[in-house]
Image (spheres, rainbow, N blue to C red):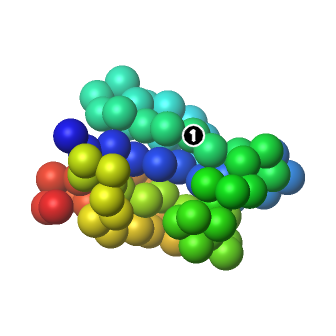
Amino acid sequence: MKKFIYFSAPWCGPCKQLGPVMEEIATQFQVQKVNVDDNPTLAQQYGIRNVPTVVLTKDGSEITRKLGLNPKQTYLDMYNQN
């Protein structure tokens, strides 16, 4: 099963803009939001150096990722093409 992992931080401006987009996506697909300040171990496990970062996983393994703020369609394409 595919899942988005959305790495963000409350102090991050682009994360605040991407938040509502990821909430919309969560109505169709599984999305796990991860606050990097509260979950540094998970962020380190995925090698997160910048936020926002959205990682697409399948059965727990990373397929692809997008860094920064992107349009909603970018994430939908990311899901459908992988």
Residue sitting at x 31%, y 59%:
61
Question: Residue 75, position in %: x, y?
Answer: 34, 55
Q: Nearer the viewer, residue 66 or 62?
A: 62
Would you say 76 lies left or right of 35 here? left
> Within 10 angstroms of label 1, few (less than 14), some, or many (20 or more) residues?
some
Name the quadrant of the C terminus.
Answer: bottom left
Residue sitting at x 28%, y 29%:
28
Question: Residue 17, position in %: x, y?
Answer: 64, 48
Residue sitting at x 53%, y 49%:
6
The amino acid at mark 1 is Lys
Would you say 32 lies left or right of 48 here? left
Q: Is residue 28 visible?
A: yes
Element type at mark 1: strand
Q: Is residue 72 above or below residue 21?
A: below
Name the quadrant of the N terminus.
Answer: top left
Q: Is residue 68 visible?
A: no
Question: Residue 77, position in %: x, y?
Answer: 22, 58
Q: Nearer the viewer, residue 60 or 65?
A: 60
Residue at the outermost right position: 11
User: Which residue is identified by label 1?
Assistant: 33
